[in-house]
Amino acid sequence: MPNAKLRNFFHLDNRHGQPGRCVRWGLVAVGLTISAQAKAEYRVSVGDVLEVAVAGVPELRQRAPVQVDGNISLPLVGMVPVAGLPLQEIRAKVGAALTSKVFRQRTVDGREVVVVIDADQVTAIVAEYRPVYVNGDVSKPGEYPYRPASTARQLIAMAGGYDIMHIRMNNPYLESADLRSEYGSLWTELAKEQARMWRIKSELGEGTQINPSASLADVPIARSAVSEIVNAEAEYLKTKQSDYQQEKAYLQRSVRQGDDEVRVLSEQQKKDEEGLQSDVEDLQKATDLFGKGSLISPRVTDARRAVLLSATRRLQTSAQLLQVKKLQDEYARRLAKLDDQRKLDLFRELQETSLKLNQIREKLQSVGEKLQYTSMVRSQLARGAGSKPDIAIIRKSEKGPERIVVNEDAELQPGDTIEVSLRYQDGPDASPRKLSSANAPVVIGRTEVTAADSRRDSR
C-alpha cells in the first residue's frame, strides 16, 4: 500500500509537469519512511523491561524484565525468548502462545467466564529501556535512565553539565590562593638561604666580591623584605666575626699569660731548689756538731723542720708549674685549632645550606607547575563554553563494543556509555616565575651547587 501511494504521488506530480520536484519530495518521503521503520525496529536486549497486556483482560497485564539468558517470564506462557527480537515479533510470539491457552475470568456478579484470547488483542511495549551511562568531565557521572530520542547534550545536562574540576582538584580559586602563598613563602626561604650562602662565603673569605642585594634583585619578593634579609645576615656576620676575633684574642692573651706564669714559676722553682739545698747543708752541719756535743738538740730539730718546709715549698711550686703548663698547652691547642674548627663548621653549614637550596628549588618548581595548572583551570572556568568537549559513545553491537566519536547532538541508544573529556587550553594568566641561573649558588670550597641545577629548574 505505501508503495502504491508513492506511485500515485509520482504520477500526479508528473501530470502537473514538475518531475524534479516530484523526485525530490519522493526521496524525502522514502527517507522518512525508512527512518520511521528503522526506529520501529528496535531490538530488545538484556536489561530492558517489557510490558505485555491483553485487551479486555487486565489480569494478564505483566511487566517482565529481560533476564540474562534473554528470556522473559509471563503467566500462562512461561519463558519466552525475546533478546534480539523487535517488538512486532515479540507480540506475535506471545499472541500465538496465548491463543492456545484458556483463561477463566470472574465477572462482577461472581460468574466465571471463559475468555478466548485473540492474537490481535496482545500488545507489547518497552516499559523501561536499558540505562545509559556517562563518565568523564561531568559533575555527576554515573547511570541514568534512557529516554527515547534523547541526545548526548541532554544526558550531560542530566549529569550536571561539564565540570573540569571533577576528581582532579578542589576549588581552583582557593587552591590558587594557597599555592600563591606557598610560592611566595618558598621564594622568601630561597632568598634567606642565598643570603646565608653569601654570609658563609664571606666568612670563608670567598664572598668579598659579591653584592648580596644585587644577587637577590631577581627574587620576586618585596625589596624591603630583601633588605631585611640581607641586613640580618650582615649583622649576623659582624657578630660572628667579632666573636671569632674576641675568642682568638682571648686565647692569644691566655697563652702569653701562661708564658709569663711559667717563667715566674720556673724562677721560683729554682729558688726553692736552692733554698732546699741550703737547708739540707745546714741540717748536715747541725747534725755533725750535735754529734760532737757542740750543739743542743733543739737546734737540730729546727734545721730538720726548715728542710721539710723547703721541700714542701718546692713541691708546691713544681705542681703549680705543671698546672700552668698544662693550661697553657690547652690554650695553645685551642688557638691552633680555632681556624680549622671554624672552617669545618662553615663547610658543614655550607653543605646544609646547599642541600636546603636544592630542596627549595625543587619545591618551587613543583608549586609553580601546580600554579600553572590552577591558572589554566581558572581560565577554563572563565571562558566557559570556550572549552570544546570530546564526546565518544561506547555502543554494543553484534561485533562487540564500538567507540564512536560524536557531537553533543548525537542521538543515544539504550545501553550507551558516554565518555566526556574537555580539551584544556592555556589560559591568559601569567605563568609562575621560573628559577634562573642568577638565583643559583656557585662552587664554594669543597661543596658544589652548580648553575646547571638552576637551569634544570627553569626548563
Image: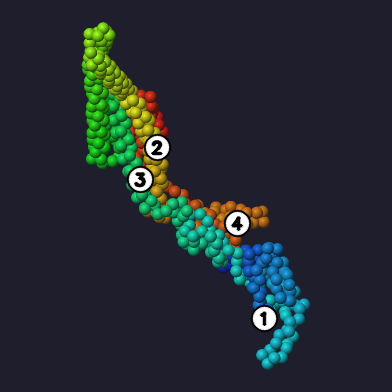
Q: CA distance from mark 2 to mark 1?
A: 78 Å
Residue where numbered disc 4 is placed: 395
Given residues 218 and 161, the one toward you in this image is 218
Residue where numbered disc 2 is placed: 359
Which mark is on residue 147? Answer: none
Percent x, y of residue 223: 24, 39
Residue where numbered disc 3 is placed: 182
Residue drawn at x 58%, y 63% is 131
Q: How many marks?
A: 4
Kindly state the secondary structure of the residue where label 1 is placed: strand
Q: Amino acid at mark 3?
A: Glu
Give the mark nearest the N terminus, 3 or 4.
3
Percent x, y of residue 43: 65, 64
Percent x, y of residue 389: 48, 53
Q: Amino acid at mark 2?
A: Gln
Q: CA distance from mark 2 to mark 3?
A: 14 Å
Which mark is on residue 59? Answer: 1
Give the mark nearest the N terminus, 2 or 4.
2
Q: Amino acid at mark 1?
A: Glu
